[in-house]
Amino acid sequence: MKISDVSKSGVCSELDICINDELIKINGKDFDCLDYIYHNAEEFVILTIKKQSGEIVEFEIEKEQEEDLGLTFFDFEIKQKSCSNKCIFCFVDQLPKGMRKSLYFKDDDYRLSFISGCYVTLTNLTKSDIEKIITQNLSPLYLSVHSLNRIIRQKMLNCKKDTDIESLLKLFSDNNIQMHCQIVVCKNINDGRHLIETVQGLHSFYPNVKTVAIVPVGLTKYREGLVKLDEIDAESAMSVIFDIEQLQELFIKKTGEPFVFLADEFYVKAEQPIKDYNFYGEFYQIENGVGLFAKFEQEFYERINELKNCNLNKSYCVVTSVSAARFIKALSKELELKFNCTIDVLPIINNFFGQSVTVAGLICGCDIMEQFNDKLYDKVLLPKCITKEFEDVLLDDISIKRLEQELKNKIEVVPVDGGAFIDAFINN
């Protein structure tokens, strides 16, 4: 990999290693960026560098474990491994045609699981992959389990390879790899007794299996030719809540930890109150929508209690999802009283993907434009989760700039944080 920078604070700044030199081996072996991350934390490492002159130089480096080598690279990327499964609930298979190309790529790469928390099925692991996970202690891993029943899991993943997930979990647990697991619940397939047995089976690997998240299957209107699946409705959501709360009570008595957590969407669908902030511990599964409301509410009240009442005398519109509408409306009422302002909460019905999709992260620009009124506000607030990472573009490639033009209103994209939500109102 060609070096793009040598940090002045890094160990390599004291060596004859320059920008545009190439790192070609680590400890005499070929490597990928994951290997570099691993060896960067070692106390002794040998770097083989190809100088711009073509000369090959080896540098033997002794350092403290916490010291950084300080190298960055022009091509420091993982060539992602694609998913070989055909999961019956796969969201990618439920996308309409004509969206940006990157949305159609299915990744299933254990390296991304370790680096960025992507969930993987482990169905495409090679022996060398397993050895690397154990040798380099790639922990934590984020795993899509869905069921410990091999027949049910194979049906859900629709994969040709019969992966014994339980044996892999045991192997990783025996080698002290920490894991966070995910179960996508499909009605009448892996719920009920099967769900209970899977969660109990995963708890047998506690504490190395640290948490389990239960997520309702997401269904769009683009399912022609796919396996028929039923939506998780209020009744089935309530049934899942009942089963999981029974298990949570049991696990808390055993270990002091609930271990298994439900996505907030279950409570919304069943019209049940969310759990308290302290219930979620370190919020390991927040990317799965687990504890998102509780965390947001905690941040909201911490911030609002710091502020004095004031007279903003302004009007705002908060764009949100159907799932979050009741929650956001309740908090907005408090802000109206605190700051003497008016706040319209606009829950966007998802016509783009289908009205059974009710989460904020899948709101599209076309639906906002279609459902927005003609009113002029001092500011319109949008949650950050509806835009592409590092870009102000929504899923349907409509930009924030275009939205501002179409809505004829100033838009602010706000982080999904209760304190930041309040600050968006009081800051110009």
Image (cartoon, rainbow, N blue to C red):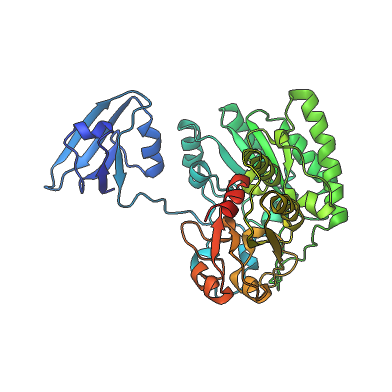
Question: Which residue is situated farthest in the left direction here?
Answer: 53
Which corner quadrant of the image does residue 261 belong to?
Answer: top right
Q: Let me know if residue 377 appears in the view.
A: yes
The answer to which of 117 and 320 lies nearer the viewer is: 320
The answer to which of 126 and 223 lies nearer the viewer is: 223
Q: Residue at x 77, y 66 (%)?
A: 228
**From the viewer's perspective, is residue 310 above or below residue 409?**
above
Q: How far across and how far down the image is residue 72, in percent?
A: 31, 44
Question: Does 319 sit left or right of 31 as displayed?
Answer: right
Q: How far across and how far down the image is residue 136, in percent?
A: 45, 33
**From the viewer's perspective, is residue 21 above or below residue 394?**
above
The answer to which of 296 and 77 lies nearer the viewer is: 296
Question: Does 25 sit left or right of 172 as displayed?
Answer: left
Q: Let me know if residue 84 appears in the view.
A: no
Which corner quadrant of the image does residue 345 belong to?
Answer: bottom right
Question: Which residue is situated farthest in the front direction here?
Answer: 311
Number of residue marks: 0
The answer to which of 101 and 409 lies nearer the viewer is: 409
Question: Does 201 sit left or right of 165 as displayed?
Answer: right
Q: How far across and how far down the image is residue 222, in percent?
A: 68, 72
**From the viewer's perspective, is residue 262 above or below residue 68?**
below
Q: How far across and how far down the image is residue 145, in percent?
A: 67, 45
Q: Residue at x 65, y 67 (%)?
A: 94
